[in-house]
Image (tube, rainbow, N blue to C red):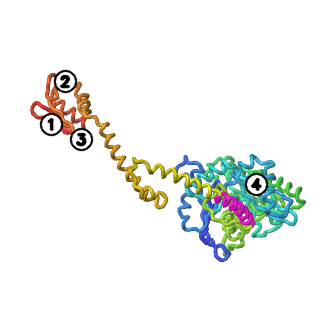
Amino acid sequence: MKVLSIDVGTYSIKAQKVSIEKKRVRIISSDEINIAQVRQQLSPNLSDDEVVIIILEDLFEQKDNFDKIISQIPSQYVVTRFLNIPVKSKKKAQQILPFQLEDGLFSDLQNTHYITKLLPYKNHINAHAFIARTDLFSTFFQKRKNLSILPHLLISEQTLIQDYVENEKIGQNFAIVDLGHTTTKAYIVNNNEVVSNHLIYFGGQRLTTLIAETYQISGEEAEIYKKENAFFLTDNQYKEVDEDQKEFALFMKRAFQEFIKNFQIWDLGYQSITGKQLNKIYLTGGTSKIKNVTNFLSQVLNIKCEYLPPCKFLSSPNSLHEKEDAQLQNVTMMSSLLLKKQTPLNFLNGNFAGNSDAQLPLFTVGFIGSRVLYISLIVLSALLVDHFVTKHNISKEIKIATKKLQAPALELKRTERQLLVRKPERLLRILKKKEKQIQKIHDLIYSQTQTDLFFPLKNISNIIKDSGEFVITKFSSKDNHYTMTLAQHTGGNLKDLQKILKAKLGTNATVKLLKKTLTISK
């Protein structure tokens, strides 16, 4: 199976082509498309969304080469709710879930589109609900549907992280931090379950702006410097560098204070609820590629920090450099969804079903199947009643039609009238033939009443009224054709009149000047 995974970010769009063979994933190619660079090639006036759509259209031109296309819904469209439902049955949990979701929701539940992941425990079920406002999601969905750029699976990053955690089992109490371009997202994990997620608007773009303002350079220069030369230092490393390097490292430390303070609050909240401490932080995202960031964060947060490990299902995970994999980790994770027995959570369902052909989980099939059976019985009963009512109505209508067919004006023979029940289609052809004959007679009579034999006289009179006085010496009209002869009387010129008539009557009419007369025929 060939799969195309697409991660739409605010800085770039990452696309990865993979082949799934024997429960392993082989990466064919990975590509990162810079949104700003594409805008410069097209038009600087295009918005980010317009550029994204153009890039997606280009990627989807290859859709026939792939069995599946997976993409993420932007984080700004989705909010997450973590719920504890005190029942053991998934069926009961599904019934209780809407009532628990309604409390504290940003709008009425009917105005939301959501998907849920149920995680069963011994005496309860934890539910992860991923919720989007219907009006915003509908606009997002319809735009992509109209342009034929809907994937087979549309997922949220939160579900992707949860699936990764379940598959990889990389620890018990840890956080996954995605250092992106405009935002930083943190997912805190306890016992292979994401128990909270957080987002702040801090990322690589803010660093670029701070570097440009502090060192009085352009944004483009600051971006290049950040990618190629930016770094962090631990406390022990300050004495090993010169003053300029020390000053820049202190600047980077100050720039990261917003993230550090927020993470400390998230960590404190996790400890207060669970009584446990985080053992590790795993980094991913483009901004995590800054030199020495893992050592720096390990020191300031007092939690061991390293890059998020490559997915175990990769055919050759060791071939990927850890920093490169950190940047492309999300698109790599997407492919793992298709290795699971359970159907991945998909936002393209219900009223927003796109070109998804994913299977339904077994418990959902049983739930729907029982209700389909009840509805089928109701529909069957209704059809039987309708059958007898319809049969009675048909008999009644046949009697009425039989009387109408006996009308003398139709001139139908008895054998023709008997065709109503046995071969109604033959009777219909006979009636249509008679209808055509009547219509021809009607059209002939109507055309005769609509013909105006004197229209040419009125038309010519209007044309020549300001050109002098002329005498009509001859006029004949037949079958919409006419011939007229004019002679000069006073104050007019036949040559000038000939030019005027040719211009007014066009090429359909013939205007000939013969000595002292002008002949018009059409």
User: Along the polypeptide, which appears first: circle 4 or circle 2?
Assistant: 4
Q: Secondary structure at mark 3?
A: loop
- Provide the residue span drawn in magenta: 363-384
Q: Secondary structure at mark 2?
A: loop
Q: Relative to 410, is 483 on the left or the right?
A: left
What amino acid is found at the position of numbered circle 1 in the picture? Answer: Lys
The chief SS type of the magenta part is helix
> In this figure, which residue is indicated by the disc labeled 2?
468
The percent position of residue 424, horizontal first and vertical second, equals 46, 58
Q: Secondary structure at mark 4?
A: strand
> In this figure, which residue is indicated by the disc labeled 3?
479
User: Along the polypeptide, which appears first: circle 3 or circle 4?
Assistant: 4
Front-lying residue, 369 or 351:
369
Which mark, residue 80? 4
Are the residues tagged 3 and 4 within 8 Å (C-beta)? no
Which residue does the image show at 76% across and 54% down from the upper left?
Answer: 80
Please check the rendered image and state whether residue 72 is part of the magenta-colored stretch, yes or no.
no
Front-lying residue, 229 or 151:
151
Are the residues tagged 3 and 1 within 8 Å (C-beta)? no
**Residue 285, can we see it?**
no
Which dot, 4 or 2, sits closer to the camera? 2
The percent position of residue 481, horizontal first and vertical second, equals 22, 40
Mark pair 3, 2: CA separation: 30 Å
Q: Residue furthest bottom?
A: 22
Q: Is residue 313 above or below residue 100?
A: below
Name the image quarter holding residue 495: top left
Q: Residue furthest top?
A: 490
What amino acid is found at the position of numbered circle 3 in the picture? Answer: Asp
> In this figure, which residue is indicated by the disc labeled 1?
512
Q: Secondary structure at mark 1?
A: strand
Are the residues tagged 3 and 2 within 8 Å (C-beta)? no
